[in-house]
């Protein structure tokens, strides 16, 4: 098998030098997930320096390491000026030699799920490379591209942001043939200041489109006119746009999503073709992610009927709606794991899924939604009606969630804790057979601690359902 990276390519791509020539079959930045044959890239992170792990990476099977400082007695090394900048150059080189179709997905909500829906479909249609988890930032996207074999048919990249000006350079690095914007919501409004600024930043993904590229845009969004204006500003009238939504003018129109506890029966009009399929993920938001996905399939010129049938095999990801059974001594409970992220739109969608569950008690366990700035208190308080309608009891943690807690009716108000670490042991003792438990919050709220505590209740020999 041809290695992913040959010595000459590593030198040409990064501008670095090799202490000893080596080939690499993959690229890693983490010794915990490193595979034999990988190139280990020693990045500087918050509170840790990848150079401290180079020796361990080589002992674990890395064929070489990319470094920007000398490590005596360790090698082989690819010596560069700066490992983060060199990783970006490595990604750019991989993109330049790639002959397949690149799709890039951004949006305030649903980008990782949409990326995974596309991976599910395209993997059936040809060799497909896609971002791992939510690798969508200044190191995640270059790493995704650097891991991409040149003979893949498709690559699905994800592009995210926290601040203005972050998306455009990543989009220009990815150079997608299809760019998808899933939603424009108030996520990160604390850094960007307004929903209009968020829309402008999301639209910056269009700056990287290939000359014959296609934009897939959310027609139902109040920000659609702004997205459309940005598209015209960047590319002029020649840019092809595929829309999705519920309006009659949408190219990919959701006609119905009849949801139950386990999924939705979806009916859609996809460019004039009536399509029906079962989506094993409940909630209208999941059906809308499917419309964005089918919009990208249409943009590629592929068959949406085939794509919809493949979507029936899609299941939600860990931290983004994954369903697991928690085995208890006298029965079991259902865990809805939404612990990876949280903003107003995704909170409301997840609470609606909880409402659909037949359960002894529907328990919402919610952590702070972060990066909302001055809008934070109100964004939390206005969730009260949704939480009360979906839940029998609501437990929360974090200072911002106090605003929701105080706004809840007494009939559903549970307990408020300072953080996830304090909430987790309480919930482990509180949960009972027949419960359905939704756990959700921003990544920084560390709600995975709560999920891990619930998962630990299942005896190891029983496993997860």
Image (cartoon, rainbow, N blue to C red):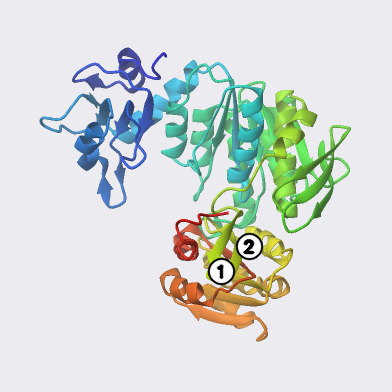
Residue 281: where, in percent of width, then height? 69, 50
Q: Quadrant of residue 328?
A: bottom right
> How far apart are the alpha carbons under marks 1 and 2?
9 Å
Residue marked by disc 1: 366
Q: Quadrant of residue 104?
A: top right
Front-most of residues 258 and 181: 258
Q: Is residue 330 shown above or below 188? A: below
Mark 1, residues whose alpha carbon is within 10 Å: few (<14), some, or many (≥20)? Answer: many
Q: Is residue 187 shown above or below 21? A: below
Q: Is residue 144 left or right of residue 121?
A: left
Q: Quadrant of the N terminus?
A: top left
Front-most of residues 298 and 391: 391
**Labels 1 and 2: the sequence-earlier one:** 2
Q: In the rendered structure, find residue 347 and report the number of the disc placed on it.
A: 2
* Residues marked 1 and 2 touching at CB (< 8 Å): yes
Residue 213: where, in percent of width, then height? 66, 25
């Amino acid at each position: 098998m041809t290695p992913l990276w040959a010595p000459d390519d590593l030198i040409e791509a990064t501008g670095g030098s090799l202490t000893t020539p080596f080939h690499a079959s993959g690229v890693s930045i983490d010794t915990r997930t490193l595979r034999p044959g990988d190139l280990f890239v020693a990045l500087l992170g918050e509170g840790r320096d990848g150079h401290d792990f180079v020796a361990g990476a080589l002992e674990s099977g890395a064929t070489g390491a990319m470094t920007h400082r000398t490590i005596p007695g360790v090698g082989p090394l690819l010596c560069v000026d700066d490992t983060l900048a060199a990783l970006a150059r490595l990604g750019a080189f991989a993109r330049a030699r790639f002959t397949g179709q690149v799709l890039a997905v951004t949006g305030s909500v649903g980008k990782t799920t949409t990326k995974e829906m596309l991976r599910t479909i395209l993997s059936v249609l040809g060799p497909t490379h896609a971002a791992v988890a939510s690798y969508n930032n200044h190191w995640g996207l270059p790493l995704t591209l650097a891991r991409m074999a040149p003979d893949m048919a498709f690559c699905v990249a994800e592009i995210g942001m926290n601040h203005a000006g972050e998306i455009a350079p990543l989009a220009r690095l990815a150079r997608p043939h299809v760019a998808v914007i899933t939603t424009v919501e108030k996520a990160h409004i604390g850094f960007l200041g307004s929903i209009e600024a968020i829309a402008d930043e999301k639209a910056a993904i269009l700056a990287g489109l290939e000359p014959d590229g296609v934009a897939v845009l959310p027609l139902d969004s109040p920000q659609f006119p702004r997205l459309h204006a940005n598209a015209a500003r960047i590319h002029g009238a020649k840019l092809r746009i595929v829309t999705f939504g519920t309006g009659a003018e949408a190219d990919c129109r959701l006609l119905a999503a009849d949801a139950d506890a386990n999924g939705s029966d979806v009916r859609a009009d996809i460019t004039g073709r009536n399509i029906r399929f079962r989506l094993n993920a409940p909630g209208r938001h999941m059906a809308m992610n499917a419309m964005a996905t089918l919009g990208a399939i249409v943009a590629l010129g592929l068959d949406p009927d085939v794509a919809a049938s493949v979507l029936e095999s899609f299941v939600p990801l860990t931290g983004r709606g994954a369903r697991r059974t928690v085995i208890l001594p006298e029965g079991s409970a259902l865990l809805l794991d939404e612990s990876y992220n949280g903003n107003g739109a995704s909170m409301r969608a997840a609470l609606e899924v909880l409402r659909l569950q037949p359960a002894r008690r529907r328990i919402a366990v919610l952590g702070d939604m972060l990066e909302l700035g001055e809008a934070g208190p109100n964004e939390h308080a206005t969730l009260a009606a949704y939480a009360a309608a979906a839940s029998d009891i609501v437990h929360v943690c974090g200072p911002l969630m106090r605003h929701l807690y105080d706004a809840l009716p007494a009939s559903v108000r549970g307990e408020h804790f300072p953080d996830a670490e304090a909430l987790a042991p309480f919930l482990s003792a509180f949960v009972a057979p027949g419960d359905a438990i939704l756990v959700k919050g921003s990544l920084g709220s560390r709600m995975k601690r709560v999920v891990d505590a619930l998962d630990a209740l299942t005896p190891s020999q029983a496993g997860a359902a």
